[in-house]
Amino acid sequence: MMTTDRLVQQLAARLEPVEPLRSPGRRTATFMLGATLYVALLTLVIARPGAAGRGADLAILIPQLVALAASLLVVHAAFASVVPGHERPTLVWAALAVVAWVGALAVTSLGTSAARGTVLAAGHELWCVAVILLGGAPLVAVLAAMLRRGAPLHPIRTATLSAVAAGSLANVAACIWAPHQSGPTAFVWHGGAILLLVLACAAGAPLVLTWRAARRAPGEPTRS
Amino acid sequence: MSATDRPIDALGILMRAAQRGDAAAYTELLKSITPRIRRVVLRERAFAGLAAVDDLVQDVLLSVHAVRATYDSARPFEPWLLAIVRNRLADGARRYARTGAREISWDHTDDVTFAASETNEETAELGDARALRAAVRALPDGQREAIELLKLEELSLKEAAAVSGTSVGALKVATHRALHALRRALAMKR
């Protein structure tokens, strides 16, 4: 059996310089800058006639700004969750932001009424689901690549935060893309799509954010 | 001042030097934190045997090594280290719960034997050592390394994975293929 002293010697012998990870705040700023540009581009590419007018409508714009603010705090919490000893306050802020965002959506949904059958039969919302899932997937992939440079302390929590952030960003594009038939319809379908993204990411997290992957990160020497 | 009494901030300075590639500082850091980690592990896992404690300490050291880039020199070192220790301890407990629940203790090994007849022969002939050495040399790099670490140096899978920088799964696969190749090579010589 290997002794601890021998392991220490081997680790020191394998030591290579590493670039310290930038702070979660700076990484969040970098990601959000790129993500905002991506969402703007996605919206432009898929926008239907009248999207610009809908984007200027405060009733649509304000929830999107809340979604962007929530995703900012959630992304920050995700980056902080892979830095040991750094996550508690950021997690609280992220939770509050998500509650505020979902609350805002729920309040706007309650303002309009829709029969249960109408909500579930809103076929056009399937496109919104596709926009959120397919539009959110590249954001999740970028986040996963960035998060793998950190410590996989809580893979499922980190993945859930990433999925919520990516889903809320893609949701912005979906909301500006086409008018919704009713508030409850958007709430159910968009919320369902984000939940699906969260479940998929949480299921995949133990395979992607692992200590084994961290130990085999780029720059780690291998004996061949 | 002994290495283990070193103030926490000094450990942060050592880690910063280690991030720049200073192996001496890194050795000093790891030697300083090992007793601290051991104390935490012993406090949290008082029921664990010495081997299990050593296993957990080494797991923490490997994890510290893997994520050393996440240490921010502007922040204190101790919370960073303790977060890793707590996480690895929790993972260790989960692993123990998963495997321990399925394990059955078995102490009566005197009368245990194996199905294959050749494993039960007390007068089995030794094989051709030279042929075996040549066959090992002829293996691809990854397979040869797996055999050398696991079968010749008799390291555990975890230790061999740490030394080779590969995963336990990859080592198992490489060993399986290497044994298969060796068996084939030696059979052809007979």
Image (cartoon, rainbow, N blue to C red):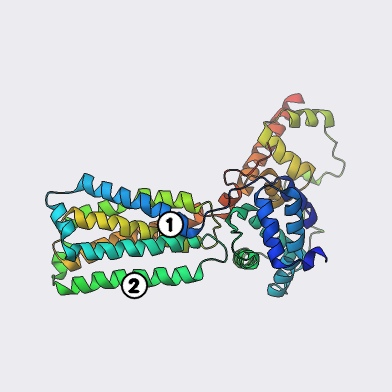
Is residue A76 toward the left or the right of residue B53 in the image? left
Looking at the rendered structure, the kind of residue marked 2 is Val
- Evaluate whether residue B108 shows in this view: yes
Mark 2 belongs to chain: A
Is residue B110 toward the left or the right of residue A118 in the image? right
User: Could you say which disc has been placed on residue A170 in the image?
Assistant: none
Is residue B103 toward the left or the right of residue A73 in the image? right
Sequence-first tag of 2 and 1: 1
Q: Which residue is pictured at 66% across the width and 45% down the height?
A: A16
In the rendered image, residue B70, in percent from the top left (x then y), is placed at 58, 56
In the rendered image, residue B9, in percent from the top left (x then y), is placed at 68, 65
Q: CA distance from mark 2 to mark 1?
A: 20 Å
Element marked by disc 2: helix
Instruction: Evaluate if marks 2 and 1 touch, with contact meaning CB atoms under 8 Å apart.
Output: no
Residue nearer the viewer, B121 or A68: A68
Looking at the rendered structure, the kind of residue marked 1 is Thr
Q: Which residue is pictured at 68% across the width and 36% down the height?
A: A224
Furthest residue in direction top, as rendered = B189
Position of the C terminus of chain B by quadrant: top right
Q: Which residue is mark 1?
A: A28
Q: Which residue is mark 2?
A: A99
